[in-house]
Amino acid sequence: MKLIRFGEPGRERPGVLLHDGTRIDVSAAVRDYDEAFLGGTGVHDLERWLATNANSAPRIAPTTRLGPPIARPSKILCIGLNYADHARETGAAIPAEPVLFAKATTALSGPNDPVKIPRGGTKLDYEVELAVIIGKTARYVPLENALEHVAGFALHNDYSERAFQLEHGGQWVKGKSCDTFAPLGPFLATQDEVQDFRRLRLWLNVNGQKRQDSNTDQMVFDVPQIVAYCSRFMTLLPGDVISTGTPPGVGLGFNPPNYLNEGDVVDCGIDGLGSAQQRVVRESDG
């Protein structure tokens, strides 16, 4: 299935994107795509409901806003420097084990919502990434069982304010967690919808010009390795997001760096996981 959430920010309702592109409201069967839904029998129950109710379920207008395809998770984790070429363009060594950092869950936003330059921000950057959504509580998970804990995958643009990240001391989380810095979706694709997560093209354009174009087969650490690794250090709950790193082409990697400006339009996508577009705006001083 392809799970969507639609409606105004903070008031999203659950829906499903059918194979013919039709978007339907499933709020009669599901309260929300949250920890209880993903960690229980929610996916199976929804499949059964759709078998008899998909044709009669309310349709969602194409102009309706899409929110992030999951309710706010307990955590968003990110893997840094997980493409060798990206590590090299930033001047960093290829890591011997996954570089793990957190992103505040308040950064979560819809796939086509504007991204805001925060107050004091001067170096807004983009990073197209494959996001893994946890579907079963994971703690000390063996590598061979890691995929049993994955609900599915989604497109994620891991925005960064590089000045906050690199010039203000401390950890990266400050530069990763501003509001709107985690547009997710347009949908969550369950595992059966993705033919081979190890070979997915991912790309990103700024104002129509290609900036990133790579494939998940270039990851240093793949999805099972990442899930198993993260579960060694913390309990992963259903709905948690792990963003698996970005390929080369980020603004920081240019010489001189080429960051985003107000009015820029960022388009990104992953094969089988749809595309999204964010326009850059400036945070109000009010």
Image (cartoon, helix red, strand yellow):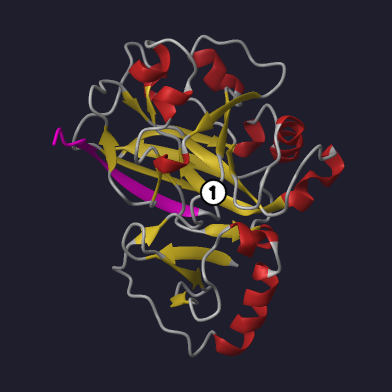
- The C terminus is located in which quarter? top left
Q: Is residue 207 visible?
A: no
* Element marked by disc 1: loop
Residue 260 % position (x, y):
28, 28
Q: Which image quarter: residue 29?
A: bottom right
Write down the region rendered in magenta.
274-286
Residue 262 position, x and y percent, is: 19, 33
x then y, percent, for residue 218: 64, 31
At 65% from the left and 68% from the top, the residue drawn is 43
Q: Is residue 117 above or below residue 166?
A: below
Residue highlighted by disc 1: 73
Residue at (47, 13) in percent of width and height: 170
Residue 121 can be seen in this image: yes
Q: Classify residue 172 as left or right of residue 254.
A: right
**Residue found at x 64% / y 54%:** 152
Q: What residue type is labelled 1?
A: Pro
Among the 4 quarters of the image, the one containing residue 232: top right
Residue located at (43% from left, 52% from top):
275
Would residue 244 be found to the left or right of residue 269 on screen? right
Q: Is residue 168 magenta?
A: no
> Viewed as shown, does residue 81 lie left or right of 111?
right
Quick check: 31 above or below 184? below
Toward which corner of the image does residue 204 lie, by quadrant? Answer: top left
Nearer to us in this view, 202 or 67: 67
What predominant SS class does the magenta segment belong to?
Answer: strand
